[in-house]
């Protein structure tokens, strides 16, 4: 009987993390092929009934986004499972937060990129594919432990030409750059209201651009490889520059 009680306690202790892992959005993405979605390209899924012209629109943007990455950082090698949601309802079911046009879900098992066709653009697609590429080059744990979130976002925003990010970095003061470099974790970066978060992205773009001045974009993959081999972020990308 004691054994049985222990087993019940053990099972209930496990239940919470297992339930979190198996949230309905997680399940929807993990088993996307079994939920009315079909592969429309290598690793790219869309609902079976998505009209042909919409499929074409998604695939054209994916191709253009990969081209944008190749033109700046070099040919991408990541092949994330990419799921095209037709609308807000589908996007929410796959785990996208309200009004978020796309997200890269990066886990130890694989990277899934969900894109919402209702807010679709090459900018968003390129942004999320950069996250997937960086994750692929670093591996899940190196990325989680060594990569500051401001740098991950700042590099992704280099290829994101949406209006709020078309900012003249010359107009962003050294103080803001120094502050954003403190936002190393998800919790710190996505803190505050929507306006603050956009300002974080803008400053992150400029802070990353500053790093890329000293370490040209074409060397990014080689630098990430050094991180993956054991080097620390500051050893590879340099410490915070002394700016007025
Ligand atoms: Zn991002």
Image: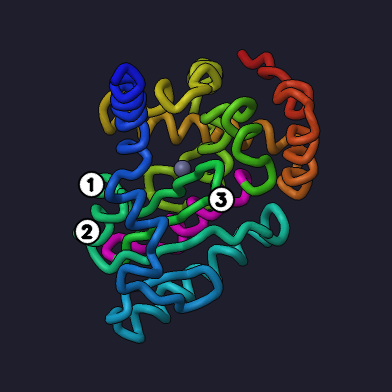
Q: Earlier in the sequence, mark 1 or mark 2?
A: 2
In-front residue for pair 107/187 = 107
What is the x, y in percent for residue 58?
A: 42, 72
Tag 3 near tag 2, CB within 8 Å: no
Residue at which label 2 appears: 88
What is the x, y in percent for residue 99?
A: 25, 49
In-front residue for pair 195/99 = 99
Left or right: residue 193 compared with residue 203:
left
Q: Residue 120 colored magenta?
A: yes
Compared with residue 207, is residue 69 higher up or lower down, i.e. above or below?
Answer: below
Q: Quadrant of the N terminus?
A: top left
Residue at which label 1 appears: 98
Q: Residue at x 69, y 46 (%)?
A: 137
Residue at which label 3 appears: 132
Q: Secondary structure at mark 3?
A: helix
Q: Residue at x 78, y 28 (%)?
A: 230
Left or right: residue 168 compared with residue 15:
right
Magenta region: 118-135
């Amino acid at each position: 009987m004691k054994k049985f009680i222990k087993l019940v306690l053990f099972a209930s202790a496990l239940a919470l993390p297992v339930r979190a892992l198996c949230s309905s959005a997680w399940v929807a993405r993990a088993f996307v092929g079994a939920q009315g979605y079909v592969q429309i390209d290598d690793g790219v899924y869309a609902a079976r009934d998505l009209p042909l012209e919409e499929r074409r629109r998604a695939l054209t943007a994916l191709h253009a986004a990969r081209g944008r990455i190749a033109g700046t950082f070099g040919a991408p090698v990541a092949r994330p499972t990419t799921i095209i949601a037709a609308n807000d309802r589908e996007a929410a079911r796959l785990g996208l937060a309200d009004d978020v046009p796309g997200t890269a879900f990066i886990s130890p098992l694989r990277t899934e990129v969900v894109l919402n066709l209702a807010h679709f653009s090459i900018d968003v697609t390129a942004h999320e594919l950069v996250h997937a590429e960086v994750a692929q080059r670093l591996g899940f744990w190196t990325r989680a432990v060594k990569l500051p979130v401001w740098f991950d976002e700042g590099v992704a925003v280099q290829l994101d030409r949406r209006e709020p990010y078309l900012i003249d970095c010359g107009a962003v003061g050294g103080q803001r750059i120094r502050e954003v470099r403190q936002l190393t974790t998800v919790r710190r970066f996505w803190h505050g209201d929507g306006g603050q978060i956009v300002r974080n992205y803008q400053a992150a773009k400029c802070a990353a651009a500053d790093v890329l001045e000293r370490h040209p974009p074409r060397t990014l993959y080689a630098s990430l490889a050094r991180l993956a081999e054991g080097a620390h972020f500051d050893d590879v990308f340099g410490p915070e520059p002394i700016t007025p």
